[in-house]
Image: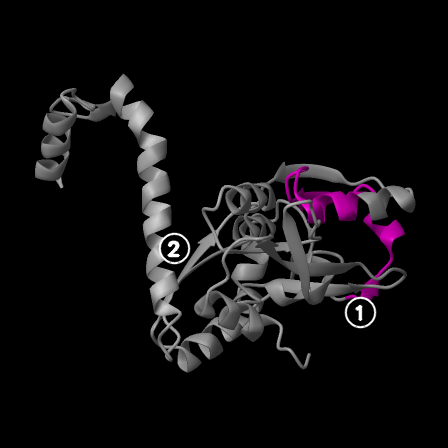
């Protein structure tokens, strides 16, 4: 690759990089060339996919980005089923915040996005994936741990660990709490659900989390899930696709695995 870059610099007659023993940075010429190089790589990948479309077997690359709470707990079974059926597909999974997923999809950096509380936009198509439900999660030594269920009013003044304010799930739970006049003491915020569970485990607070997020390992470590008695907080999950973008066999097959045509 270094020889190729030096050959390119020689052909162009200008240096593209500033090299030191510790770092390599782009010069002005390199910065101007970068978007063209990125576009060429993208076009090259699309050209490869167009050729693969002529083959009978499903192969190629599918770039997927999901929010943590869906990617870690909802997707694995679908991914296993997909790769068993289409072993020649290279499936690249990344975990991102909702805002990053919309941004990367619009930029063409991913093919499929999976988020909670999806929002359709002028350039983004949204397909329903699933619906999960939020429940209260606390440690086994918490006062709620031995209750079958709790009311929202009982959450008043409780120490909470929450998703960050820009997270759609956080906005939804805040709206439900506000609607019922319940105020909680938010002690920490994080967009990573695994870190939130760790905060609950050390007794930092309780949380409203997706039911599927509590694993058997979590239960063995002492985490408990309690139903909400007087309200049901459903969380819709959606698949995001860029409108008018190429949709190759592998990508279509992956989406069909998530949402079969006969579903």
The location of residue 27, given as percent across then percent down, is: 25, 19
Q: Which residue is mark 1?
A: 148
Q: Residue at x 67, y 62 (%)?
A: 127
Relative to 158, does residue 220 appear above or below in the rendering?
A: below
The location of residue 196, given as percent across then percent down, is: 58, 49
Q: Is the image coloured rainbow, by chain, by secondary structure, or in one colour?
A: one colour
- Magenta run includes residue 80: no
Relative to 158, does residue 59 appear above or below in the rendering?
A: below
- In depth, the one of 26 and 178 nearer the eye is 26
- Viewer can see residue 141: no
Left or right: 38 in relation to 216: left
Q: Earlier in the sequence, mark 2 or mark 1?
A: 2
- In depth, the one of 254 and 180 nearer the eye is 254
Secondary structure under tag 1 reads: loop
- Viewer can see residue 200: yes
Secondary structure under tag 2 reads: helix
Q: Quadrant of residue 234?
A: bottom right
In which quadrant is the C terminus drawn?
Answer: bottom right
Q: Which residue is mark 2?
A: 46
Q: Residue at x 51, y 47 (%)?
A: 96
Q: Quadrant of residue 91?
A: bottom left
The location of residue 41, given as percent across then percent down, is: 32, 46
Q: Which residues are magenta?
A: 147-174
Crowding around mark 1 (Cα neighbors within 10 Å: few <14, some 14 to 19, many 20+) is few
Q: Are marks 2 and 1 in contact (CB under 8 Å)?
A: no
Tell me how far mark 2 sits from mark 1, CA to CA: 54 Å
The location of residue 34, given as percent across then percent down, is: 32, 31
In which quadrant is the N terminus drawn?
Answer: top left
Left or right: 209 in relation to 69: right
Q: Quadrant of residue 228?
A: bottom right
């Amino acid at each position: 690759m270094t020889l190729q870059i030096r050959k390119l610099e020689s052909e162009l007659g200008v240096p593209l990089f500033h090299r030191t023993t510790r770092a390599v940075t782009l010069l002005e010429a390199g910065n101007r060339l970068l978007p063209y190089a990125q576009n060429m790589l993208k076009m090259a990948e699309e050209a490869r996919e167009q050729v693969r479309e002529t083959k009978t077997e499903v192969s190629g690359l599918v770039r997927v980005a999901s929010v943590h709470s869906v990617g870690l707990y909802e997707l694995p079974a679908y991914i296993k089923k997909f790769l068993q059926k289409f072993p020649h597909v290279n499936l690249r999974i990344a975990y991102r915040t909702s805002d990053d997923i919309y941004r990367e999809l619009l930029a063409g950096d991913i093919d499929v996005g999976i988020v909670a509380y999806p929002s359709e936009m002028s350039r983004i198509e949204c397909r329903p994936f699933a619906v999960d439900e939020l429940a209260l999660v606390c440690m086994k030594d918490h006062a709620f741990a031995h209750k079958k269920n709790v009311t929202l009013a009982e959450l008043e003044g409780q120490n909470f660990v929450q998703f960050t304010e820009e997270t759609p799930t956080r906005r939804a739970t805040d709206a439900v709490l506000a609607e019922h006049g319940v105020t909680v003491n938010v002690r920490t915020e994080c967009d990573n659900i695994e870190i939130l569970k760790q905060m609950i485990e050390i007794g930092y607070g309780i949380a409203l989390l997706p039911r599927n997020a509590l694993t058997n390992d979590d239960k063995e470590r002492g985490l408990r899930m309690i139903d909400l008695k007087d309200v049901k907080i459903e969380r819709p999950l959606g698949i995001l696709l860029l409108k008018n973008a190429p949709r190759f066999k592998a990508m279509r097959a992956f989406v069909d695995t998530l949402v079969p045509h006969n579903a």
